[in-house]
Image: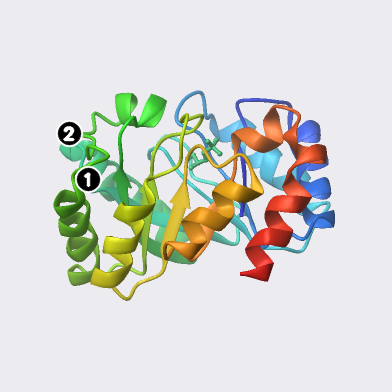
Amino acid sequence: MTLIDPDKQLPEASARIAKRAVAFKTDAIMVGGSTGITQEKLDKTIECIKGVTDLPVIYFPSGANAIAQRCDAIYFMSMLNSLNVKNVTGEQSKGALTIRKLGLETISMGYVIVEPGMKVGEVGEAEVVPRDNIPMAVGYALTAEMFGMDLLYLESGSGAPEPVPSDMIRAVRESVRIPLIIGGGITSSEHAATVLRAGGDIVVTGTLVENGGLESQLEHVVDTVHSI
Ligand code: 1GP
């Protein structure tokens, strides 16, 4: 899945990124970012993206301050290792009625921040899972599954120097049956292959499409994901 942050470029530029990602056969577009998301920017970005593709556009929210009106689905997500309850159930409870009134499809997701966590770890006030603390990651994964969540997202943070460690992904994969999304620091087909071989089901790339890797790397990454 290709992640587009509405705060990083104008809506028309987001649509251009989406169009190229679709040409390279990405499977879905995620829209979201940790800071600077306004309702207007979000809705305009999704409108522009939907003008260039029929692929699912999934909103990846950072709070209840902006809820995409025209997305195909929204992650109804809880940052399980946040120390601030607003990121666990607070923002969700503020946004739930709006989501219901809009009739949006919700995909429940446990969101777990792994070291270094980057910006999302900071603004989310996460007690990040240390890269060598596999039991802690497994505990959160089981928590998500036992709560009945549809997905688990292991996130090392946008722009992280390395993806989530393979041995952590492997241990989590062996512990739960729900699909596993891996994001943060995946900038090459080697990274994508490593996280998928360890047991990830879905790879998310964001920074790659913002910093020039769109043309040079994304096609290879998607091809690699589809070949595993
Ligand atoms: C961030 O996991 C995503 O939420 C994507 O991370 O920007 O490092 O690809 P990158």
Q: Residues within 10 Å of mark 1 (few under 14, many from 20)?
A: some
- Please say whether residue 194 is visible from this viewpoint: yes
Q: Depth check: 190 or 208 in front?
A: 190
- Residue 162: percent from left, percent from top: 46, 35
Q: Is residue 145 left or right of residue 5?
A: left
Q: CA distance from mark 2 to mark 1?
A: 7 Å
Identify the image's colour scheme: rainbow, by chain, secondary structure or one colour. Answer: rainbow
Q: Amino acid at mark 2?
A: Asn
* Residue at the disc numbered 1: 88
Mark 2: secondary structure: loop
Q: Quadrant of residue 187?
A: top right
Q: Amino acid at mark 1?
A: Val
Q: Which mark is residue 60?
A: none
Count of labels shown?
Answer: 2
Residue visible at 28% across and 62% down?
172
- Residue 12: percent from left, percent from top: 81, 34
Residue visible at 28% across and 71% down?
174
**Residue 141 vertical position relative to residue 156 in the rendered view, above or below:** below
- Residue 107: percent from left, percent from top: 42, 64
Q: Quadrant of residue 163?
A: top left
Q: Quadrant of residue 5?
A: top right
- Please say whether residue 97 is visible from this viewpoint: no
**Mark 2 in CB contact with mark 1 (< 8 angstroms):** yes
Mark 1: secondary structure: helix
Q: Looking at the rendering, in which quadrant would you find the C terminus?
A: bottom right
**Residue 105 vertical position relative to residue 127 in the rendered view, above or below:** below
Residue visible at 22% across and 52% down?
137
Q: Residues within 10 Å of mark 2 (few under 14, many from 20)?
A: some
Q: Depth check: 51 or 161 in front?
A: 161
Q: Is residue 66 left or right of residue 210?
A: left
Q: Which mark is residue 84?
A: 2
